Image: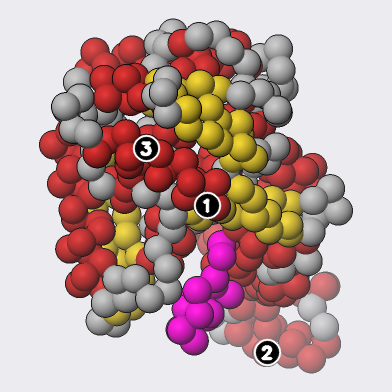
Amino acid sequence: MSKNLIVKDNALINASYNLDLIEQRLILLAIVEARRTKQEIKPNQFLTICVSSYIDEFAIESKTKSVYGNIKNACKTLFERQFSYEKVTSKGNVEKVTSRWVQSISYVDKEAIVRIKFSDDVTPLITNLERQFTKYNLEQISDLNSKYSVRLYEILISWRSQGKTPMLPLDEIRYRLGLMANEYKIINDFKKWVLELAIKEINEKTDIQVSYEQHKQGRKIVGFTFTFKVKNAKKAQSAKKETAAILAAAAEQVEPFEMNPLFEKIAAYVTPAEQKAYLETYSGEQIAAIIERADEYAADLRTQGKKPRMGAVYAKAFAENWGTEKLLEKQELEKKKEAERLARQKELEAKQADEQQRLDDNERKRQAIEIFEMMNDDEKEAVLDEIDSRLASFFKKSFRQNRANGIPVYKDTIVAIMLKKIIFDD
C-alpha cells in the first residue's frame, strides 16, 4: 500500500471548512508522514513534519526563503481554524459539531520542523476506517495551487466508484468549499474564480478528468452534477487494489457494511451506522418517502432564499418520520384504486360470462333445431307432443294452431328453448 496514501472519513470530506492552501498541505502531509513513519495517529500524539518534506512533496523551490515564513505563519493560523460537520446522536437527534483541527501546533525554527497534534474530533475521522471513506495519493494534489482545487478534488474522488456525483445543490457546494456568505455571491464569479478554475487545475494536474452540468430552476442555477474519469487505467487498477487493502485492514476494526442503493443519490453523507439504524426502523418504501419529503423541504427553503444544510435536514426528517403520512395517503389511495379496479374487473367478467352464456344457449338451440330437422316425422311428432305437454296454457293455443297449419313451430323462441331442453335433457 502506498505510504503517500491519504485516508479520510467522508464525514470530514463533506464537512465545511476554510483552510488556505498551506494549511491544507500541512494537514495532508501530517497524515502521510504518520503512514511513512508507521506512527499511529491517536489523541495526544505529536506528529512531526519537516519543512524539507514539504518542499519536496509540493515542488517548492528550496531557494525561496518565504516558504519558511509562510509555514511558520500557517502554524499560527491553523491553530485558530475550525470545521463543522453533522452527525446523528443515538436518540436520532442532529448534532452539529464545530471543532478545531489541531489542539497543539508548533514550529521549531532552528530545526525547520512542525510539530502537530490533531484534535480529539479529527483523530477518529482519519484513523477509524469504515466503508465510507475517501482515499487518494498525496502526489495527485501536490501540484494544485488553489485551496478550492484541493477541496473539490476530495469531494469528487469520494464518488470514485460511480464516476459521477448526484446533483449537489449550490449552497451545499459552497458550504463544503468553506465559502463565506459574502464570498463570490454572484454565480458567474463563483463559476469563474472557484469552480472552473479548480476544474481546470484538476484536469491539468491530477489523475482525473472532470466536467460538470449545471441545473436550473427557471433561470436560476441551483446546483451542479460532476462527471469524471480516471485518466490512466493502470492507476485506476492500482487504486482498486489499494482500496481492497484498506478494507482488509479495516475488517478487524469495523463490521463491513454495504452501501444501500436507497442512500446513494441523496445530497448528504449518511454514515453506515445511520444507514443501518434507518434500515432496521423503516421499510425501503418509507425511506424513499422520507428522503423525498426532505428534498421537497430543502427545495422550498431555497425558494425562500435560505440555504439548507442537507445533512441536518435528512437527520431531522428521519427522526420525525417526515413523508410517512404522505406515504400512508398514497397507500390508501392505491388501495382504493385497486378496489375500484377489482370491482370493474368483476363487473366486466360477469358481463362476459352472461354474454358467453347467451352465445352458448343460442348455439345449443341451433344444434337442437338441427337435430330436430334430421328426425323422421314420427320422431318429430313425439317431440312436439312433449313440448305441448310442457307449455304453459297461455302459449298452447297459438302453438296448436301453428302446428295444425303446418307452420314450423320449433323455430319459435319459446318452443326452441323447450326443444333444447328435451333433446339435450337440460
Amino acid type, residue under disc 2 in the picture? Ser
Amino acid type, residue under disc 3 in the picture? Ile
Rendered image quadrant of residue 127: top right
Left or right, 294 with respect to 195, comes to: right
Residue at figure coordinates x 21%, y 29% from the top left: 60
Residue under numbered circle 3: 71
Mark 1 or 2, which is nearer the eye?
1
Mark 1 or 3, which is nearer the eye?
3
Residue closer to the observer: 115 or 152? 115
Compared to 26, does 352 lie above or below? below
Residue under numbered circle 1: 81
Amino acid type, residue under disc 1 in the picture? Arg
Residue at the limit of the structure toward the front, as seen here: 110
Q: Which residues are magenta?
A: 296-310
Mark closer to the chain start, 2 or 3 = 3
In the rendered image, residue 423 lying in the magenta stretch gets the answer no
In terms of secondary structure, what is the magenta stretch mainly?
Answer: helix
